Image (tube, helix red, strand yellow):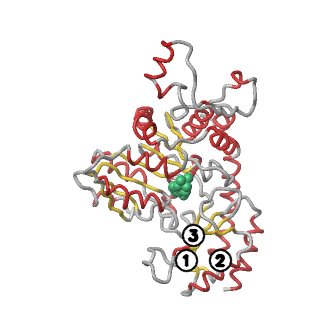
Amino acid sequence: MDISYIINELGEDREAYFEAVAPPIFQTSNFASKTVAEMRYKVQHEEEAYQYTRGNNPTITILEKKVAALEGAEHAIAFGSGIAAVAAAILSQVKAGDHVVCTQHPYSWTHTLMNKFLPRYGVETTLVNGTDAENYRRALRPNTTLLYLESPTSFTFDLQDIPAVTAIAREHGCSTIIDNSYASPLHQHPLEMGVDLVVHSCTKYIGGHSDVMGGMICGSREKINKIFEDEYMTLGAILSPHDAWLLIRGLRTLPLRMARIAATTQQVVSYLAQHPKVERVLFPFLPSHPQFELAKRQMRSNSGQFSILLKTDSIEKTDLFCDSLQHFLMAASWGGHESLIYPVSATYTATGPKPNLPFNLIRFYVGLEEPDYLINDLAQALEKV
Ligand SMILES: *Cc1c(COP(=O)(O)O)cnc(C)c1O
């Protein structure tokens, strides 16, 4: 399907609302039926009916149809946050006694879900170095039901060879989930590579303006309908119609933003990669990166995130560099208009346990600013170190 068609027309029924170009926000909790027969149908086919907004809502449906089509999925289901989508997807694939294999350094709350929350319900997780797909195979147990991917991963931006991992899953009869937030639905199509469920934090690129939170699961109609009936209707982590509307608005400019971000990031990374005060840039689209060939094979383009290791063994110098940046905001998240840093040193405390990432690692997100504006800022901050 044509991307322009998906973004501008798919799912929109303008005749039904006075040819309004922007869809209405259906700010309603429930929908009436004219007859018992109609109500009976809606009650018994809630997954395809407008009966109650915890199930379906027309504004949210427009968003779901568009994201599903961008991912090449039959169907999609929206959530109130990315982690709600991650949690629902994982819960849909495990039961007490099951085992999950996951790549190391997943998104922090995914890690908490697997290592603190799921064990309470008898589900265990093994984290593996996902840069070698065979590590997934080595960690398999007879009760393994799910292989979980996040490629590239948060903070270290390691890739998993997606077709290789899904082949192992098929051999073993496991299902696969990937968190595709980094790539956005434009830069990587995991369903084509055999993944069962694709998850997004819509808070990031799909929203694109740092003003809304949301999540999405994409997959087959059968799998999504099952999630609808179980995790979706019972846990109730839904998106609001207004937030769906904001995400539809974000989608209108997604290709434009992603292209701009990809190009600026290449320039910023090239600058940092040659800088004597930078030890290493963690960015799979650098030709010197060990997974460069894999990145080119399974992704269409880079996005705006990468990390650097600053060449210093001093946490004070790392902090000084970060404090000196004037145009990169220091914040969690990414995917908006504004460039950001997330210094790992912020997770270090004098007495607490040592985090598993080095303090001189700084995650960057490149937004929509002019490249020189960002590079000049980096230059003056590096000068100070
Ligand atoms: C932010 C993020 C999430 C969680 O999304 P929220 O919308 O913050 O709940 C999940 N995965 C990745 C990779 C993320 O960056």
Q: Mark 2 highlights which residue?
A: 322
Tag shown at residue 307: 3
**Residue 296 appears in the picture as rendered:** no
The tag earlier along the polypeptide, 2 or 1, is 2
Q: Nearer the viewer, residue 349 or 155?
A: 349
Quadrant of the rendering where the C terminus is positioned? bottom right
Q: Amino acid at mark 3?
A: Ser
Mark 2: give few (<14), some (14-19) or many (20+) Cα within 10 Å: many
Say whether disc 2 or disc 3 marks the residue closer to the N-terminus. Answer: 3
Q: Position of residue 248 (x, y in %)?
A: 66, 40
Structural distance between the alpha carbons of marks 1 and 3:
13 Å
Residue 135 coordinates in the image, percent (x, y): 33, 62
Give the residue at mark 1: 345
* Neighbourhood count class around disc 1 (C-alpha, 10 Å): few under 14, some 14–19, many 20 upward: some
Marks 1 and 2: in contact by CB < 8 Å?
yes
Residue at (70% x, 45% y) in the render = 253
Q: In the visual, does 105 lie left or right of 257?
A: left
Residue 59 visible, this orientation: yes
Write down the quadrant of residue 334 in the picture.
bottom right
Pair 1/3: label in front = 1
Closer to the N terminus: mark 1 or mark 3? 3
Residue at image location 27% in from the left, 60% down from the top: 138
Single out the mark in the foreground, 2 or 3.
Answer: 2
Q: Residue at x 40, y 48 (%)?
A: 90
Amino acid type shown at disc 1: Ser
